[in-house]
Image (spheres, rainbow, N blue to C red):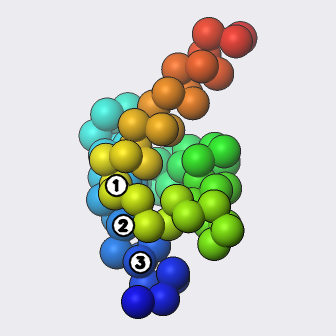
Amino acid sequence: MAHGTIRAATLPEVIGLIANQYGVSDREAVKIFYESHVGACFADDDSGLYGQSALYLFSLLKEELKDRSTDS
């Protein structure tokens, strides 16, 4: 299966998890995801993150956002 196909199958689930956890729209959830380091790595074929589960990606994103909020 092509990397793009794998990403297309995983992304809606990740976006749904973000939207539910943070009480934001799907559009805002996409923005949060792709402006994160996790989202950038997810889009990079060399990182291998495209093959990970939605829950794993979401857990990485939550950690990143938590770390960002404690750094501020």
Q: Amino acid at mark 1?
A: Ala
Cβ atoms under marks 1 and 2 closer than 8 Å? yes
Viewer can see residue 24: no
Q: Are marks 3 and 1 in contact (CB under 8 Å)?
A: no
Height in image: 72 above or below 27? above
Label 1: element kind:
helix
Within-10-Å neighbours for mark 3: few <14, some 14–19, many 20+: few
Looking at the image, which residue is at 53% across and 20% down? Answer: 66
Residue under numbered circle 2: 10
Q: Badge 1, how many Cα within 10 Å: few under 14, some, many 20+?
A: many
Q: 31 or 43, which lies in front?
A: 43
- Quadrant in which the C terminus appears: top right
**Percent of width and height locating residue 26:** 40, 54
Residue, disc 1: 54
- The numbered dot on residue 6 is 3
Whether residues under marks 3 and 2 lie with C-beta atoms below 8 angstroms apart, the answer is yes
Q: Residue furthest bottom?
A: 1
* Number of residue marks: 3
Under circle 3, the secondary element is: helix
At mark 2, the secondary structure is: helix
Q: Residue at x 43, y 48 (%)?
A: 57
> In the displayed structure, would residue 40 be above or below residue 72?
below
Q: Amino acid at mark 2?
A: Thr
Residue 66, labelled with which disc?
none
Q: Is residue 40 left or right of residue 3?
A: right
Q: Please determine whether, in this image, residue 44 is positioned above or below residue 23.
A: below
56, 40: nearer the viewer: 56
Kindly identify the residue that appears in the image at 51 percent across and 82 percent down.
4
Q: Residue at x 62, y 10 (%)?
A: 70
* Position of residue 37 measured from the top left corner of the image (x, y, whole percent): 66, 45
